[in-house]
Image: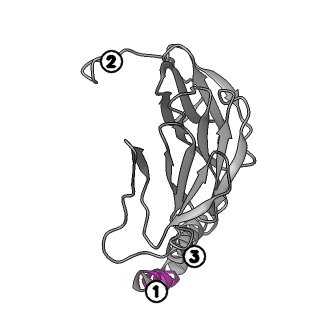
Amino acid sequence: SSDGGRSWTTGARLMGYFSETADVAPNDPMRVYVTAYASGGIPVLLRSDDGGRTVREVTRNFSDAQGIYLAGVDARRPDVLYVRATRGLGTMLLKSEDGGMTLRSIGETRAEMVGFALSDDGDTVWIASTSRAEGILRSVRGGPWTRVGGDVGVQCLRYHAGLLFVPTLHGVPLSTSFFSALSLVAWAMATVMTLTSATSRARVLLAMIWPIALLAAAA
């Protein structure tokens, strides 16, 4: 769309891919990045250099990550982009300086990374996870990560006009252990649903009600 969303034209058709996230280089609207999954759930990074009319695959190498999400594109350099890559319960922050052809890990969180922000000059990066213990981390000009924010339930991060905005959980905080345990319960339930008979499923799911209740009480 070139009129604020009132009308749309069709761009490239991503045949054979399940798209996940997309982002546009702020200083080059012709450069578009898309994360997607190929057959078999293989994560891939796609790129367009003509505003989305055509798209090509640039890499499938994400250090054995299970999921990938575009975090941001440098406001001044369209070849510099950041990708969140989930691996286990944690998340890596990957950076590319060649338009996505190669990526390297520049940081990670032990819990799921839910926040990313980049300064207008591209020199400062902030990340945050669901873990209150990890807090908000900052790296300046590729330097070491420093904890700059404390005990808040970060939902996302946003940098604009010299200010870092931090939307947080309101009310009773949920701990990282709660999210981790709940994820394990969800995984176990999904496994039960696929591997056991209907009778066994009912028995096991009923037996799992009490740990879910304990998790809710612990929150």
Q: What residue is disc 1 on? A: 214
Q: Is residue 135 left or right of residue 89?
A: left
Name the main secondary structure of what is drawn in magenta: helix
C-alpha distance separating marks 1 and 3: 23 Å
Q: Which mark is residue 8?
A: 2
Vertically, is 58 above or below 113? above
Return the x and y of residue 213 as percentages of the image width and height: 43, 84
Vertically, is 10 above or below 90? above
Return the x and y of residue 140 as percentages of the image width and height: 60, 49
Going by the numbered disc 2, the residue's amino acid type is Trp
Q: Quadrant of residue 109?
A: bottom right
C-alpha distance separating marks 2 and 1: 49 Å
Return the x and y of residue 90 as percentages of the image width and height: 63, 61
Name the quarter where the N terminus is drawn: top left
Q: What residue is disc 3 on? A: 200
Please state the extent of the stretch shown in magenta in the rendering. Answer: 206-215
Q: Does residue 214 belong to the magenta stretch?
A: yes
- Can residue 193 be seen from the camera position used here? no
Say what secondary structure mark 3 lies in.
helix
Query: How busy is the neighbourhood of tag 2: few (under 14 within 10 Å), some, or many (20 plus)?
Result: few
User: 149 or 179, which is in the foreground?
Assistant: 149
Name the front one of labels 3 and 2. 2
Going by the numbered disc 1, the residue's amino acid type is Leu
